[in-house]
Structures are given as C-alpha cells and as structure tokens.
Image: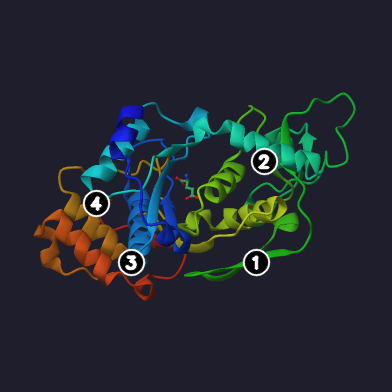
C-alpha cells in the first residue's frame, strides 16, 4: 500500500488554513466504499473545502481482526476515481500503536484506567444500558475479583452529563456512567480501542472539525471524555445523517451495502449530494468530474443538510 499512499501524498503549503479548519475522512478498511461512507467522505470534504481548509485521510485499521487485506488500497482508488484530493500522507492506525500506548500510559499513571477481568458475556448478562447496549456495571473498578486475570483496560467514567453542541444535530448529552459505564480503551486481544485511537489521532493530526455519520453520535461523548482526561483540544462536530437501507439498517458491510461503482463517479456523487440536500442541477450528471466538484464546492450549504440521525439511501444503493 505504501507506494499508493506516497503517490497520493500532497503536502500543504498554507499553514494558516490548517489552523482554521482541518477536517478528515477516516474509513475503516473492511471493504470497498459504499454509499454510507461516500456520504461521509463528500460531506467532510465539501465542508473543509468550502472553509478553505485541509482535508486529511486516515485508514482506521486499528481493529486489525476486522480489517480486510487490500481494502485500504481499494478505498484509496475509489476515492481517487471519484476525484477527491487530500493533504499529506495517509495515516494508518496499525502503524501508530506506540502513540496509543503513550497516551494509555498517561491514563494509567494518573489512575484513570483499571484492568478488568470480565468477559463480554459477563458484562452483557449483568446490566442493560442505553438502547439495550451493555453497560459496564463496575465489577472490577476497585480491583480484580480473586483468582481472575486482567483482560481489557477500562476508563473510569464519572457520573454527570457529557454534552456538546453538534453543528447539525444540536445539543447532545449523554450520562456516560448511567448509559455506557467504564469503557474499554485497551482490548482483551491486545489492540487499542477505536475510541482511544480516534481521539489520539484527531489531536495529533490537528483536526479541528470532525464531519462524519450520525451512527457515531453515541461514541462522541466517550471521545470528549477521553479528550478532557488527556487535556486534548475538542474539535467541532457535525454528524451527518447516516444512510439506512429499506429495512432501516445502517449501510455497512454487515448489511451487505453495495460497493460504489467506479465507472460512473458522477452518478454516485450526484446521489450523495442529493442525499445531503444540496440540490445539484440534473445536467451536472453529465458534467466533467472537475466541473461537478466545482459546483459542489461553490454551492455547499450546511443549512440544506437534512436533520436527523438516519435517512434512507436512494434506490439502488
Ligand atoms: N472509522 C470509522 C468508520 O468507518 C469512522 C470514525 C470517525 O469518523 O471518527 O465508521
């Protein structure tokens, strides 16, 4: 993959724009781009470009067991054929373990994390949290039960609401202690958790604006909690509606979302712009890719974005 990554690298020369707005798209390489990930790519790209900002690309392969060999390359080629251009090198989480470890050690030194012996099954059996997800009941918070071995490491969360103002979804609050409980930052299989990796990466890459699908809205309070604990800056958030299929399920590899067809990038981009409420004129479907992007950057309006967390994908996606 390295050759491809370097080939695409384009270093920025405008540092002031970077300080004002640096966005990113952070796909997990579990398969080719589908309509849901295309929407996040288009939304984050246009929001950054309209603000004269930078747009970075990060391969979120921290969850190595779920990553599919070759998928990162396929995604990069998909994005290239769709006409996206990104700043700098593509960061790969699988190469950043030392950074996650350093932040984890900080948390460990100040007593923010504890070792936990519980299996998933034990946690699931013991308590139900928000939307029937398992809430960790605090079993190992004050020490491992006798005879049990450490598996994962969890961050201690305090009672009280964690709130933020989302640029599209409005004020979002979550009581982490009541709804989630102490959450995993270092997994039983030895990999760092997405929640920690994304916070470390966004901070170290100087990301100022996170534009992504609202399927991740429930993760944001955990990420803000980690940012506060680590003394890291909190980016601005905008959670786009997540695309769902006819059955109301989020488009994903698991729900067998179709890959974006590479041969007609205009068609896919028009569909994404339409989904995002941007009302592209129909004749743009036959325009050159550069002209389509020029129109999209000139006409991007946050105020046209549909509100809500989930929106049906157009037919065919
Ligand atoms: N890698 C995550 C995904 O593909 C996105 C994480 C993020 O944008 O913060 O769902």
Vertically, is 62 above or below 23?
above
In the rendered image, which residue does mark 4 sit on? Answer: 316
Visible residue check, residue 116: yes
In the rendered image, which residue does mark 2 sit on? Answer: 103
In the rendered image, which residue does mark 1 sit on? Answer: 163
Which is closer to the viewer, label 2 or label 4?
Answer: 2
Q: Earlier in the sequence, mark 1 or mark 2?
A: 2
Left or right, 139 with respect to 154, comes to: right
Marks 3 and 2 close (CB-CB < 8 Å): no
Which residue is at the front of the view, 65 or 105? Answer: 105
Q: CA distance from mark 2 to mark 4?
A: 43 Å
Looking at the rendered structure, the secondary structure element under dot 2 is helix
Left or right, 150 with respect to 273, comes to: right
Looking at the rendered structure, the secondary structure element under dot 1 is strand
In the rendered image, which residue does mark 3 sit on? Answer: 50
Q: Earlier in the sequence, mark 3 or mark 1?
A: 3
């Amino acid at each position: 993959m390295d050759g491809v990554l370097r080939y695409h690298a384009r270093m920025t020369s405008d540092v002031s724009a970077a300080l004002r707005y640096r966005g990113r798209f952070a796909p997990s390489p579990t398969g080719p781009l589908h309509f849901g990930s295309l929407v996040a790519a288009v939304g984050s790209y246009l929001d950054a470009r309209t603000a004269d900002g930078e747009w970075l690309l990060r391969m979120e392969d921290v969850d190595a067991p779920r990553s599919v060999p070759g998928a990162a390359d396929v995604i990069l080629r998909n994005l290239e054929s769709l006409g996206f251009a990104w700043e700098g090198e593509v960061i790969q989480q699988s190469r950043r373990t030392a950074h996650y470890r350093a932040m984890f050690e900080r948390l460990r030194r100040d007593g923010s994390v504890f070792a936990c012996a519980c299996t998933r099954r034990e946690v699931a059996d013991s308590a139900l949290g928000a939307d029937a997800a398992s809430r960790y009941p605090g079993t190992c918070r004050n020490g491992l039960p006798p005879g049990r071995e450490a598996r994962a490491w969890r961050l201690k969360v305090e009672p009280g609401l964690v709130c933020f103002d989302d640029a599209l979804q409005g004020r979002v609050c979550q009581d982490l202690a009541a709804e989630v409980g102490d959450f995993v930052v270092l997994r039983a299989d030895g990999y760092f958790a997405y929640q920690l990796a994304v916070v470390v990466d966004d901070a170290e890459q100087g990301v100022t604006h996170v534009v992504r699908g609202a399927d991740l809205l429930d993760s944001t309070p955990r990420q803000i909690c980690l940012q506060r604990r680590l003394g890291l800056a909190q980016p601005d958030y905008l959670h786009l509606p997540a695309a769902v299929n006819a059955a109301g399920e989020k488009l994903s590899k698991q729900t067998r979302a179709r890959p974006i067809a590479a041969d007609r990038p205009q068609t896919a981009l028009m569909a994404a712009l339409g989904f995002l409420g941007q009302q592209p004129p129909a004749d743009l479907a036959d325009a050159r890719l550069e002209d389509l992007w020029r129109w999209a950057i000139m006409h991007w309006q946050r105020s046209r974005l549909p509100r809500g967390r989930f929106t049906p994908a157009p037919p065919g996606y």
